[in-house]
Image (cartoon, coloured by chain):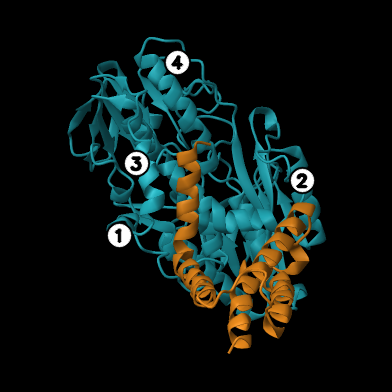
Amino acid sequence: MTFSGILTVVWYSALPWLWLISVMLVAFLVPQLLARMKSYSFTSKGGMGSKYIPPLVVLLAFFLVPLQTQSSLAYVNTWVDWMNLIGVSIGLGFYAWLVFHPICFMRNSK
Amino acid sequence: MPKKHLPFESVSRRDLLKLGLGAGVVGPLALSSRGAKAVNTQAHIVIVGAGAGGLSMANRLTNSLQGAKITIIDTREKHYYQPGWTLVASGVWNQDKTVTDIVDWLPKSVNWVKGHVAEYDPDNNRVLLEDGQAVSYDQLIVASGLQLRYDLIQGMDVDLIGQGKGVGSVYASMDASAKTNEEIKRWISKGGGTGLFNLPPTALKCAGAPIKMTFTTLHRLEDTGRREQFNVEFMTPSGGLFSVPFYNDFIKQRFSEQGVTRNDLWTLKAIDADAKKATYSVKGGEDQVKDYDFIHVVPPMTAGAALENSPLAFQPNENFKGWMKVDRETLQNPDYFNVWGIGDVMGMPSNKTAASVKMQAKVLEENFLASLQGKPLTAKHNGYTSCPMITAIGKAMLVEFGWDSKLLPSFSFIDPKKESWTVWVMKERMLRPAYYAMLEGKI
């Protein structure tokens, strides 16, 4: 497949989710920017939220992602299925950390 | 329950481009159009049919030819993503996800003749339209698809679908798919009864669709917790369910495990929709009449009268009689070297899927350009076709094969013989984008 072909497929795949991608981008950028104005970095101390919410998101994603695709955890069958599900869940957990870590930092520094 | 619409899902490509969204993505795409490799020609190329094959070729040739005049002939204004119709009829998708405007996929430079071919006249390099207009060509690409012959089933009419008479058919149209879903829901809400699922006695497009419809309906019946109240039967005119032996055996085994009664060598002959009775001709036996509460009708399919009665078709003494005659590897008509085929219209084993078109388009473009330059035709179609075989709502197998039923998996990490959630996600989320990229001639 050509590079242009890959981009076209990615574009059409993203189309229904542009609103969600935008919301997630804002939810990521706003706390990051606000916290960095108060000298936040990824190595800064977070808080309870950034400690417990990301693992909770990973756990929830594990069950909810298959449901979101109109499937169920019972149909996660092959090693590729498991790798994909684990990868997506960890990815969402990491995203939650990126959002909540700066929020907790700002709360602590008040 | 069909999923609710997501924002942007039914917005046309043109609208999105107007909005300027994704300019960063679309921008680089423009770089690939009409590159330095374009072939110069003054040829008039006529494409019959603005379906998957016709639109793909219109886009590909627009990009790869310089100076050519390209005409596409079709009466339709809408393009349907037909591989999505099983999801619509299974209650997974909203029907609106499967429709776009043809004009959104046609390059501006292509001349669109809104007509229907009544006669092919390859000896004079022209096609005649139903309104009497003659369109001459230097090169002809036949991408006219196939005809659904509901009329060959006595008493059957597509208008019966969704009338509360238990008649459904995923093939008839986008609306019919949605109405088929309603009919299945009505049957389920009755709490019991008989459902009849059929295969036609002819070649068919998306040969897995009748089986997918059976599996998704079984899923829905099992979800009621009263599966034993429902009788499900599957009729096969040939005795076979799928052309690839492994999948044929798999489906037979699964049908057996899920309590589906198979009636081999039964062909749907007539329907009495008011009485909810179906008549079957049985090979080597007497006709049988079955009562039903729901019937999934799959019509016989042909290439259409204009093609069948033309010199471009396989003759009665040949395999695939009535379908378009092409060299199955080069996709060129062996009698008229300036005539080419793509898609469902061609006489080939299997190969009536969008996935086949994707592979054929690449081969056809390469051979077409070689022919214009007087070079030998070196690209060869390997018979690739694909069918994500949905075995329940939420899981599927990625069935990919070529000539002689040889498995041709695209992804080494996906086991083609195992049901998988990932394959379901591919079917539900990724194949429509890939299809649209194919229409644009990008893949």
Which residue does the numbered mark 1 point to in the structure image?
Answer: B15
Q: Earlier in the sequence, mark 4 or mark 1?
A: 1
Q: What is the three-letter code of the residue carrying label 3?
A: Ala
Of labels 2 and 4, earlier in sequence is 4
Q: Give coordinates of residue B408: x percent, y percent.
A: 67, 34
Q: Specify whether A51 is left or right of B16.
A: right
Residue position marked by numbered label 3 in the rendering: B30
Give neighbour class at mark 3: few <14, some 14-19, many 20+ (Cα, 10 Å): few
Residue indicated by mark 2: B417
**Image spot of residue B3 (x, y percent):** 52, 72
Viewer-side label of 2, 4: 2
Which chain is home to disc 3? B
Give the alpha-carbon distance from disc 2 to disc 3, as whole Å.
39 Å
- First in sequence: mark 4 vs mark 3: 3
Q: Which quadrant holds residue B392?
A: bottom right
Q: Nearer the viewer, mark 4 or mark 1?
A: 1
Q: Secondary structure at mark 4?
A: loop
Q: Note whether residue B298 is visible.
A: no
User: Alpha-carbon distance for marks 1 and 2?
Assistant: 41 Å
Q: Amino acid at mark 1?
A: Asp
Of the two numbered discs 1 and 3 on the same chain, state the one appearing first in sequence. Answer: 1
Q: Earlier in the sequence, mark 1 or mark 2?
A: 1
Q: Of helix, strand and loop, which one carries label 3?
A: helix
Q: Nearer the viewer, residue B194 or B3?
A: B3
| Chain identity of mark 2 | B
Residue receiving disc 4: B334
Q: In cyan, which chain?
A: B
